[in-house]
Amino acid sequence: MAVLTEEQTMLRDMAREWADNESPVTAFRKMRDAAPAALFDAAAWQAQAEMGWAGILVPEAHGGVEMGFVTLGAVIEQLGRTLTATPLAATAAATSAIVLGGSDAQKAEWLPKIATGEVIATLAIDEGPRFDPAKMGTVTSGGKISGTKEFVAEGDSAQLFIVAAADGLYLVSGDEGVTRSTRHMADSRSHAQVIFEGAPAEKLGDADLLGKVTDRATAAACAEMLGMAEAAFAQTNDYLKTRVQFGQPLASFQALQHRMAKMFTELELMRSAVEGALEAIDGGRPDVPASVSLAKAVAGDTLRLVSSEMVQLHGGIGMTDEHDAGFYLKRARVLETQWGNAAWHRERFARLAGY
Amino acid sequence: MATAEIDAPVNALDAFRAQAREWLAEHFKPELKGKDNSMSAVEGPNNDTPEQAAWKKAIGDKGWSVPTWPAEYGGGGLGKAEARVLQEEMARVGAWNPMGGSMGVMMFGPTLLEYGSEEQKREHIPPIVRGEIRWCQGYSEPGAGSDLASLQMFAEDHGDHYVVNGQKTWTSGGQWADKCFALVRTDKSKKHEGITFLLIDMDSPGVETKPIQLISGSSPFCETFFTDVKVPKANRVGAEGQGWTIGKRLLQHERNSLGGGGSSAARLFAGTPLSVLAKKYVGEDSEGRIADAELRTRIVKHEMDLRAFALTLRRVQNEAKSNQGPSAATSIMKNVGARIMQERSELLIEIRGMAGLGWEGEGFDEDALKDTRHWLFGKAVSIYGGSTEIQNNVIAKRILGMLDHQ
């Protein structure tokens, strides 16, 4: 656990308690079965907004608490544990874009509405199935933007898009020139195709903003992955202690104990890497890109291990839809892929470190 | 302990910093910087220069070789916060701790402070503080490695003393040690409860050491034979049958130090970066990357593993400072430290090709020859002090609360 301030600790503990009591995995299951058009849990989002979580990154002058990424990560981690389906991470990533690159007018227009949860915002970056921010086909001309964005998180409901074009980021709001198509994915969450055809767009920040913003989105995803990996591991550990075969609990078999010890070891390293990235962002350090790539690569490898082992060690029951293991497995692969998989981030780390 | 940190007012710490600075200026001569004779703690003072010996005496008399040990036994008697200030001041001038690597300081001393009698502490702690007495560890036996509690070396009760017979092995520095802290059996009818913790003079009649040559060519460990060795009962730590409890506590000190405090991670980062070495031996592609893409991926994975380990070390230290209590992450340190050290050694050899496998003599870089020996000796790290497999048992049982097998 990172060393948190009293205020951060309170918020983290509150988030944990809320997730356990108000938003357990059964809430995600209900959302999945109901499949609302927005593909998130509206009641949970409203509760989060009321608790002020949508404003964690928003400066106080615009109605938020401006507590930074360590705090945001500590909250998202708790939500990841129970697979809470809300647009918190997507909105936070978009928020960071406005905080970092927005003009005073843009900040004044959007941040107060984001802080109250009135506006759901998201990043629209990818144009294909694999993360490739260097290749942007989206173009702008005369204040209008055109291009096709794929797998936009919360794209089914977002009212505000931060859209990447060849020459930088743009703000797009409203439905003029915007066409959304739902993509039903394995994790039952919202990842829409969004086509912009001459949609009114406002320039946001400088050309180097894209990298900063995707690093922040990646760090938020890492925090969710950390919570998921912790929960998947804890549930598997509990199961091994109760499931009896050959007249003894599975937890008494050394082959399984050592697999758990291995996962525990990797989880501790993952926590250090993820918290390290969040701290680098809050510290405004120059090694944010390397720290984030380290975190995403370690998080990707570790969550892949833990989510796969969760199914395997649960045996047949882990294969059933009735059990939660599948939810963790499916969401895990989506987050592993989003914002670049482990191999992508290893390659970036390698280039940054001179390999 | 933690209260010292909170209570010490900032100006008191500043005063202590000034005091430490002044003392260091007087006793640590600038020419001693980088002249750390780290083997002196193990092999004895014989090869110390007069300057090294004087520094050793000064810091030993002051008790700052073990800053937080009680002053009544010769230790520094400092609180945690003061000790940290001292560490910072020593680092600032490049002052090293001549006793820092000794078995007495790292393992035996803390254990004796916890379990020893008043007389034992008065007798044994001060010489450890001053680096006058070298201790070795009599734990493993030929038939008792990972299953340490099956040890057989027997101490027979002869009234006011024991008569000890048996063999210990992997005795680090046994050939140079003055004294040995040993686990012996005093009751053959019980396993763990039949073990007792004894302190044995290495110059007692009947003690014989024989260095073991390792695959790396070095002989840091001995076989130690005990034949009718008389040991006064005053040299027993704790009660008969309490040896396992005491011995395990000592192992925790050992594992914490092996896990690689900050210093060993720093050592891994030191030296020629793997990227530079790989480009030199393997070459670069048109974009300036290591030409062998598969090797490059493995080097990068290793480097990232090392960074995550370093971040974990930092996290454990921060968590300890903030009084959150010992982090669960401490239990993974030895295994991860061993894995990273061994991977790095393997990569260093692989990158250099045949030039990475030189044993001695002409035709090889000095660094490469060191790395060969380091690679071979490094295979011991996942075996000694509780093998990787034993550490995984510990994690499964103590941390995860999984059940005893068998």
Image (cartoon, coloured by chain):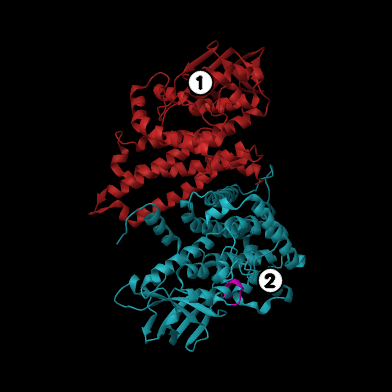
Q: Quadrant of residue A310?
A: top left
The answer to whether residue A1 is magenta is: no
The colour one sees for chain A in the rendered image is red
Relative to A68, residue B91 above or below: below
Dot 1 lies on which element? loop
Q: Nearer the viewer, residue A338 or B245?
A: B245
> Picture coordinates of residue A102 (x, y %)?
64, 22
Q: Which mark is residue B172?
A: none
Chain bearing mark 2: B
The answer to whether residue B278 shows anywhere in this view is no
Q: Nearer the viewer, mark 2 or mark 1?
A: 2
The colour one sees for chain B in the rendered image is cyan
Q: Which residue is mark 1?
A: A116
> Picture coordinates of residue A113 (x, y %)?
54, 18
3D distance between C-alphas at marks 2 and 1: 65 Å
Q: Read off the magenta span.
A: B127-132
Residue at (50%, 65%) from the top-left corner? Answer: B254
Q: Nearer the viewer, residue B268 or A74?
A: A74
Q: Which mark is residue B58?
A: 2
Residue at (53%, 86%) from the top-left corner? Answer: B203
